[in-house]
Every structure is written in C-alpha cells, then in structure tokens.
Amino acid sequence: MLPCAERVVASISRRLFRSYLSVSSRRRCNITAFMPEAAGFDGVSDRSTLQDFSVSNSEKFWAAAARHRLSWIRTFDAVRDCDLSRGKIKWFEGGKLNVSVNCLDRHVHTCPDKVALIWERDEPGSEVKVTYRELLDMTCRLGNLLRRRGVKRGDCVTIYMPPCPMAVASMLACARIGAAHNVVFAGFSAEALSERIRDAQSSTVITVNQGVRGGKLVELKKTVDEAVQSCPTVQQVFVATRTENPVLMAARDVALDEEMLKEDVVCEPEAMDSEDVLFLLYTSGSTGKPKGLVHTQAGYLLYAALTHRYVFSYQDGDVFGCVADIGWITGHSYTVYGPLANGGTTVLFESTPIYPDPGRYWEMVQRLKINQFYGAPTAIRLLLKYGDQWVRKYDRSTLKTLGSVGEPINTEAWEWYHTVVGDGRCPVVDTWWQTETGGICISPKPSDPDAEIIPGMAMRPFFGIKPVLMDTEGNVQSSSDTSGALCIAQPWPGMARTIHNNHQRFIETYCQPHPGYFFTGDGAYCSKEGYYQITGRLDDVINVSGHRIGTAEIEDVVNQCPVVAESAVIGYAHDIKGEGVFAFAVLKQGVDTQYGDVSQQLKDTVSKKIAKYASPDHIQFVKRLPKTRSGKIMRRVLRKIVEGDLEGLGDLSTLDDPTAVQEIIQGNSELC
Ligand code: PRX
C-alpha cells in the first residue's frame, strides 16, 4: 500500500488531472494509423484491445513488429523459445541482421542528409550536427580500422567516452563488425573501469584524450592509462581528440581520428544472428561485483525502437532530447539505439543541468527545438529549487512529451515538470525500467490521448508486458489495490539474456526468486484501476541521483581502508538526489581521535575506487554495529535510526548486543 499521505495527494492530483483531460481533445484514432502492423491482429480496434492482444498473443504481436520494424538479411524461423524458470530466453532465432544497417544504412537510402545526431557540447551554442550519411561514414571507417587492427566478430570492445558522435560511431562500428561493446560510464574511476575491462576480457579500449563537463576538463585518457595497468588483456587503446591538449601516447595507443581517415567509407556489415551479443553493460546488484548484463541483437533493437516510438509518441522529424549519459542503459536505448533505429534525430548531451546556469536544459530546448525531453527526477528536483524564471525565460513551445526515468518522481517534482516546464500541455511519462529490461516496461503511454495520467505513477504496462505482484509468500496477488514484489510474467524481446560469464547468477537473481517469472528487485503498488506505482527496491541496491549502486560495493571499499574494522552502508531519503549514502564505520583501535580526517579519507577513497556519486554524504563512527546473534548486520535498524523513526525500530530481540543501538542513536542525534 502507498503511504496514506501519498495516496491522498495522488487522488487529489488525479482529480485535477482528470479535469485537465476533460478539456483536452477526445480523439479516437484509427488503430492501423497508430500501429500499421496491427492491421493483421484479429479483434483489435483500439489501443486498449491492442495492449490485450500484445499480451495474450505475444508471439503474433512481436513477429509482426519484428517484420515491420527491422530490416532482415534473413528472416527468422521461430519467434521465441523461452523458459523463464531456466533462464532460457531466445527471440527470432534463425534470423540474421545487422544492427548498424538498421540504424544507419536504411535511413541513408531514404534521407542521407537528415540529421542523426546533435552533439550538444559542454559549451552552449557550439552544437555539432551529424547527418545519417556522415554517421555511416564514421562508423564504416571505424569498423574498418577495428577490423584491420584485429578486432573480430565475438570480441568485446570497451568504450570509455562521454556522449559524443565518436562514441556513437564506436558503438555502431562494433555492431557493424559483430563485436560486442562494453560502454563504461566516463564518471567511473580507474579501478571500476579496470574491473569492467577485465571481466569483459577486452583487448581493445576506445577513449578520448580529455572530456569536458561543466566547464572542467576530465582526464579520461589518464584514467584509462591507470586502469589498463592491471588489464593484461588490453593490447590497444584508441584515443579520439576532444580537446586541443596533447596527452601522453604509449606504444599501444592509437590516434583514432588520424587513423580513421586512412580507412574506406564502405565497411561490409556482418550478418549477425538474432541472439548474438550486441553489448554488455555493467550494473550493480545487492551483492558481489557489478554484473555485465548481456543484450542481444534483434530483440533488444526492436524493443528499444518500439518503446521509443510509442512511449514518447515520437514522430518523423521530431528532435529527441534524452540527457542521460551513454554509459547507462537509458543512453543506450533512448539516445542511441531507439532513436536511430527509428531514423530520428537524437541529442547527445555532454554538459550538466546547471552549466553555465540552471537554464541550460531549457535554453537547449529552445535552440535545438527539442520535441521530447527525457531526464531524471534528480535534475528536475535540483532545477525546481532554482525557481521558475530559469525555465520561463526560454521558448519551450516545441516540447510535446516530457519523460522521467531512473528513480521515483515525487509529486512536487512531477507537478513542476508538468506545469512549469511543460506549461501544463505536455504529458509527463514516468517510465519504469532497468538495465535488465532493455527498454521501458511501465509508463503512462502508449494509451489513448485522453487517458488519465496520475502524477508519480508509472501507470501502464507496455505492449507485451504482463506485470504481476507477488506477496511475501511468493503467491501472485490476484486483486488490485495491493502491493508486492514486481515480477514480469512472460518474456519480452528486450530483456537481458544472461550475466556475462555467470549464467547461474542470472538465474539465481532474476529467475529463481519466483520460478516462471522475471523478478525485477523492485516493489510496486497496483491501484484499483490497474495502474502501477513503483515503491522502491526490495534489496540492498540504492539509487543515488538516478545512479544505481549496491550498498555492499561501497562497504567493500570502506572496509579496505586500513583504519576501518567494518562498516554498514544504507540509503536515506535525500531532497535532491532521491537517496543519499549513509555509512556507519567501526574504526580500528587507536584511530578514533582523528575523526575529521578519517571521514574525508573514506569519502575520497570511495570516489577514487568507484565514482563520485557513490561517496558517502554522512559517515558515523560507531563502536559496534547492530548485529544478530548469527553476526548479520541489522541494516533495517540503521535505516530507522537515520530516518529518526525510533518508534519503528521493530523487534530487537534477535540483537546480539542491544546497547549498540543506544550508542548509535545517541551518536546519530549528535551528528545530525
Ligand atoms: O529501482 C528502479 C529504479 O531504477 C532501477 C534500475 O536502475 P538501472 O538499471 O540503472 O536503470 C535506470 C534507467 C532505466 C529500477 O530497478 N527506477 C527506474 N525507473 C524508475 C525507477 N524507480 C521508480 N520509478 C521509475 N520510473
């Protein structure tokens, strides 16, 4: 159940929104104009019957979509061969295609001069436009270069770059020659990068000399140099040029721009099997090292394209502005693959929401005439605090849809996004999904144009998605107006296929908790009307500024500090970031006199070993952690203390030493 206050707000907002809807147009559209492949679907006359059809006739639905939306070298023999209980997921077997051809060549045939990418560089007003023809040329040259330098089908290339055309060309060049890519967020530290290169066994890395973000230079090549020292597999590092500043080039380093010029602009695409790997993308789980989720060719591309088209009502000619970094799944699916598969124009955002000032997004919307804007609640909450004037200053009349992703959007942020940014006329789509799902699974759209949208609710399942909620006993909740663990009852083409080199972990994490269902790790509430609201993670994964991180990963790093005996990390509600990081650390004997320094040292260590966003906001030094008699840290108790909910500490009878809790409460009240 939603907390009571939230439900009241939701119901008031719903009423307000209904009245808004009552004055909006009540168009009913012709279903085949809406989705051409629906022409062959029996009994489908409107969007709601189309949704039902897509779930109950999933194979027919996806087969028609795959034929209609993708260009195949050889058509598929079977639509799907899946057994969720065993983690077996195969779509469109027998089919052959090339993802780069789908994203580039077919559009070059029809509209070579259409702008594919708008690179919104850090310096406002210095955007660079790249047409489909130009992007194909770049991709082919890069594909030829990779091939000439020994990269083969099935290899995995690590890309450590900020959003820029060369990063997109690198991803597509890999796809063209049949190599998988492994894009690592350029905010990750050398250690985090090196761990991902090693796990992916990459022999090739692509990077830039320096990044530029928020007016500052970021030493990406230096970070790669440091990372590859502990990566024996790496034989070559391609270095693109973003700034004029020269960087040290070692024997294994290759000047990418220069070398590409020597290559031909024609590069024969590999005919890839539908289930060949397209990319790995590392993400955090509740335990262990980050896992390399594997996405494959046809199913992923189809799902990215279809969700991009229908969730955002993307029309030919629109400019799509997804401001996520390409190092995350949002950047993969909605900056690169979805928009390009649909022949769209997509923005690559290199900067920050407040550089050079808090009007950056909206000045960009005006200058680039963006039609769909897709961002994270954390940025919306931050901008809201700067006031409406930064928004109202700019013309946002091109905007048609506003999207939100990565974390729950609170009602205040939702309302501001809707009324101030969107002038009350653009639907806000709160999209729920994950690295694992490949694309959006729950969102207000597609739906009839006049269907209601409730602030803060992700609302409706996408085509082919059948969400179910499980109770604590693992039974499917049969009624609505209920909460539970969010699972998906049948496979869909965009879902991850495995964890790189660890299928058993994939099965244990996603398939075994609720056999026959895909378990998402999130909790959700389903209203009487069948609308979904995500209530948060059910495991020890937290979401800091829309970035996912396992508390165990942070603890691991904190525990490695020589002064620390042990630690426990939890997430707590944070005004801007959604969740902040709170660490409790027990220091080794003799170091407890230098709290200030130690605290900064621990924060710096986490920044250096993982990334800045993972660094604790607060560290409380404690004599001991609350543990059960079997030695398990009771994080639930720590969460309640940080929330200030001492009444809600719950059953403490299993505690090994109840005085630990009193000490922590005392220390916490002094700290906060
Ligand atoms: O907890 C959910 C939260 O982000 C997690 C997925 O993180 P990641 O794989 O990094 O992908 C982020 C971009 C899709 C989910 O398990 N999450 C994502 N979208 C929402 C959300 N929580 C609430 N509302 C959302 N719209």
Image (cartoon, rainbow, N blue to C red):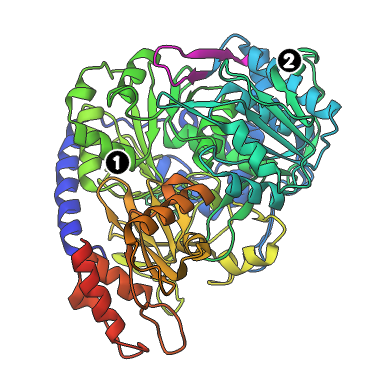
Badge 2 amino acid: Glu
Q: Quadrant of residue 158?
A: top right
Mark with earlier residue (1, 2): 2
In magenta, the rendered stretch is: 118-132
Return the residue at label 1: 451
Q: Tell me the residue at 68%/46% (across/down).
A: 197
Looking at the image, which residue is at 37% across and 40% down? 376
Residue 250 or 314: which is nearer the viewer?
250
> Residue 525: x and y, percent?
33, 61
Relative image position of residue 387 (x, y in whole percent): 17, 30
User: Circle 2 sits on which residue?
Assistant: 258
Viewed as shown, does residue 25 lie left or right of 603? left
Q: Say what secondary structure mark 2 lies in.
A: helix
Quadrant housing residue 612: top left
Seen at 71% across and 50% down, the residue is: 198
Q: Amino acid at mark 1?
A: Ala
